[in-house]
Image (cartoon, rainbow, N blue to C red):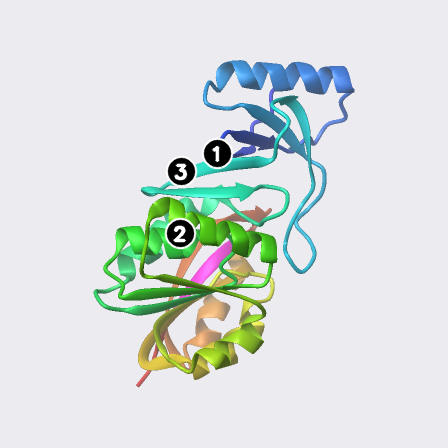
Amino acid sequence: MELPHSYDIIGSILIFESKQKMTKIQEKKIAEELLKINKNIKIIAKKADIYKGKYRTRKIQIIAGENRKETLHKENGIKIKLDVEKCYFSSRSSQERLRIAKLVKKNESVLVMFSGVAPFPLVISRNSKAREVYGIEINPIAHKYALENIRINKFSNIYLIKGDVKKELPKLKKKFDRIIMPLPKEAKNYLNLALKYLKNNGTIHLYLFSNENDFSKLKKEYSKKFKVKLTKCGAYAPRIFRVCLDLKRKI
């Protein structure tokens, strides 16, 4: 039985997807082997479901190691505490978060919609000179972890709001230099809302899923109103990619 080639590591938890039928004994053997070759890993789990629902969460099944689903993940100079089953988080987006942080200019006011456990706000605060970073998240458990993550990392320029973006954003009564929208399946439905709270020379980072054959069409569609840069952020399915459209408002 081959070891899985594809897996996610979040903190001390390794999560793999089994594409072949295995007995519980076979799963246990594979999990124990993965523990041996990954010295920093304390828990081996397998995906028991896909991300779904309003909070984009998924079930996992622990196969070996410690019996917990909470972990402390480190990336780009920050620490992120979370429960991997109760909060959405992608460790594979680490480099993309750093790319965005490096685009943030001094004294910018930044908004992260659908901010989760606050990976984008934390990475931006650590790796830029943003004046302030706001995050809005609807999942109360993710929001609770996000608040704890601010304390863990000792940041003072991050402001987090629990609730629905459509209801909470108008209450802020302010505009932003940069708005990040990391919700690929639904983000474009919030674009008009984001534009209301974007400064005239501002930038939106809109995340979508797209077939690679449609990249040119996608850029053309958005270039009517924006200067567009498309960045591939990882494979989602065969020929389908998670992409970020950097949309600079045309003045």
Task: Tell me if residue 104 comes above or below residue 155 in the rendering.
Answer: below
* Earlier sequence position, callout 2 versus callout 3: 3
User: How far apart are the two marked residues, 2 and 1, measured between alpha carbons?
Assistant: 17 Å
Circles 3 and 1, Cβ within 8 Å, touching? The answer is yes
Q: Quadrant of the C terminus?
A: bottom left
Label 3: state its secondary structure: strand
Callout 2 amino acid:
Ile
Q: Nearer the viewer, mark 2 or mark 1?
A: 2
Residue 134 picture quarter:
bottom left
Mark count: 3
Q: Is residue 247 visible?
A: no
Q: Which mark is residue 150?
A: 2
Residue 103 picture quarter:
bottom left
Q: Which residue is mark 3?
A: 74
Q: Quadrant of the N terminus?
A: top right
Label 1: state its secondary structure: loop
Q: Residue at x 40, y 38 (%)?
A: 74
Q: Range of the magenta residues?
A: 242-246
Taking the image as shown, residue 243 lies to the left or right of residue 24, namely left
* Earlier sequence position, callout 2 versus callout 1: 1
Q: Which residue is mark 1?
A: 11
Q: Is residue 62 visible?
A: yes
